Image (cartoon, rainbow, N blue to C red):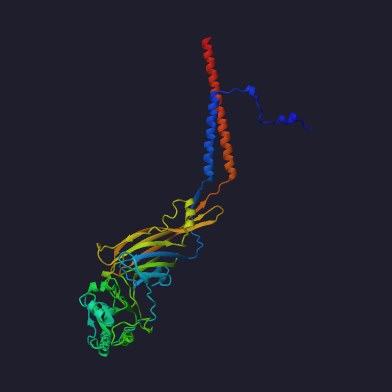
Amino acid sequence: MISSRNIKSMDFYRKIPRDLTEASVSGAGLSIVAALAMMFLFGMELSNYLSVSTSTSIVVDKSSDGEFLRIDFNISFPSLSCEFASVDVSDVLGTNRLNITKTVRKFSIDRNMKITGPEFHSGPVAHAIKHGDEADEEYAEGSVPLTSDNFERVSHQYPILVVNFFAPWCYWSNRLKPSWEKAAKIIRERYDPEIDGRILSGKVDCTEQPELCRRNHIQGYPSVRIFRKGSDIREDHGHHEHESYYGDRDTESLVKMMEQLIAPIPVESEKHVSSTDNSTDKIKRPAPSSGGCRIEGFVRVKKVPGSLIISARSGAHSFDASEMNMSHVISHLSFGRKIIPRVMSDAKRLIPYLGGSHDRLNGRAFINHRDIGANVTIEHYLQIVKTEVLTRGSHKLLEEYEYTAHSSLVQSPDIPVTKFHFELSPMQVLITENSKSFSHFITNVCAIIGGVFTVAGILDSILHNTFRLMKKVELGKNI
């Protein structure tokens, strides 16, 4: 049978009677210092345990979001009309998507980037525009030349004013000219402006009247505008709201369009009466209320090098490249899924610098002040890298695409455009939150306590023995 005496013999921590111990000032000082050191080191260890640490690695991109990448954008062009603004996408695999409209919205804006009206709907063109075959025929001038001096007077005089804004050098303007003059002559004979007074056909040469064309936001030639007198007069500056004609350009179609415009207007009245005939809705739409355009929305592109292109585009209009100005302000440009602010906040708790390059071009303005000449294309070269953040347990917290951007203004012989060249890296940045063991924390705390206690004991022993030796030496000198 094991006795209590045998059990006591196994005690590793044998006690010294208090009467046999001796307290000292140096020991008390070391004890206080040791206690403070333990508390300080314990606090540091606890802070390290509670803090978040991460490890970063570069791995081959193993995207789980498919083979397509989403591009979100909101870009304002103060000198590009929504009427012709086109969003195109192309890539090295041969993809070439033109005039994307399903996921893109356009708003007319003024020079101060303020929206001036509702969303602009360009509308689909159902077929190729038909032109007349009168190019080789002789024809008489049927439309009235308009200038800055008489335009306002004429537009207030007739309930309907149909104007062809053209440029003599333009191929499409020259194709329209015979049909336009012939149609104008027919309308003039059927509805004499002096007697009937309901409609007048006019024309404006934009090479001779650039300010008048600019005031009416003409950027493509030819542009047929329909001005109405009366209920649609704008309050600001007295200018008329107007519509654009997008229908066929042969004589028969033009005459039919003009007759449908004046059908609901009585001869004896010059007041505009709202028409209930919707047969022309597909060939005429509201023209832009101002000369600028805000383009916002998103497109999906393949994850290969490609380009997002914004330009003036039309299959039946010509553009004066020297007058095109592709200056723009980028309100937003980002890649990948939209990130919820709360998720980004949680991710920045791990990596404070994260998200700084997610929308690097936001708020940047790229303005062509004409100091380098005309025909200026603005290009942006974007290199995109995917970043993925994993929390403890390999749970995906965030997936974002960051990019670097280099921009340049380049003169080009072609129609100026704005290009965003993008290229994705085949590698991705993987940021992982490091897990910390509680047992490791406890072990470090014990090591701190034991280590400080042991070191303090050694120092106390050295100091105590040093003082005793000094006293002995002093006593020996006295003897």
The percent position of residue 311, horizontal first and vertical second, equals 34, 69
Tag count? 0
Position of the N terminus by quadrant: top right
The percent position of residue 267, horizontal first and vertical second, equals 29, 88
Toward which corner of the image does residue 110 lie, by quadrant? Answer: bottom left
Residue positioned most to the top: 479
Residue positioned most to the right: 1
Toward which corner of the image does residue 282 lie, by quadrant? Answer: bottom left
The percent position of residue 43, horizontal first and vertical second, equals 53, 39
Q: Is residue 276 left or right of residue 1?
A: left
Residue positioned most to the bottom: 190
Residue 163 showing in the rendered view: yes
Residue 387 showing in the rendered view: no
The percent position of residue 38, horizontal first and vertical second, equals 54, 35
Q: Is residue 322 left or right of residue 116?
A: left
Front residue (pair 198, 365): 198
Which residue is rendered at x = 57% and y = 35% of the image? 449
Toward which corner of the image does residue 99 lie, by quadrant? Answer: bottom left
Q: Is residue 53 above or below residue 428?
A: above
Which residue is rendered at x = 27% and y = 80% of the image? 163
Q: Is residue 362 left or right of residue 32?
A: left
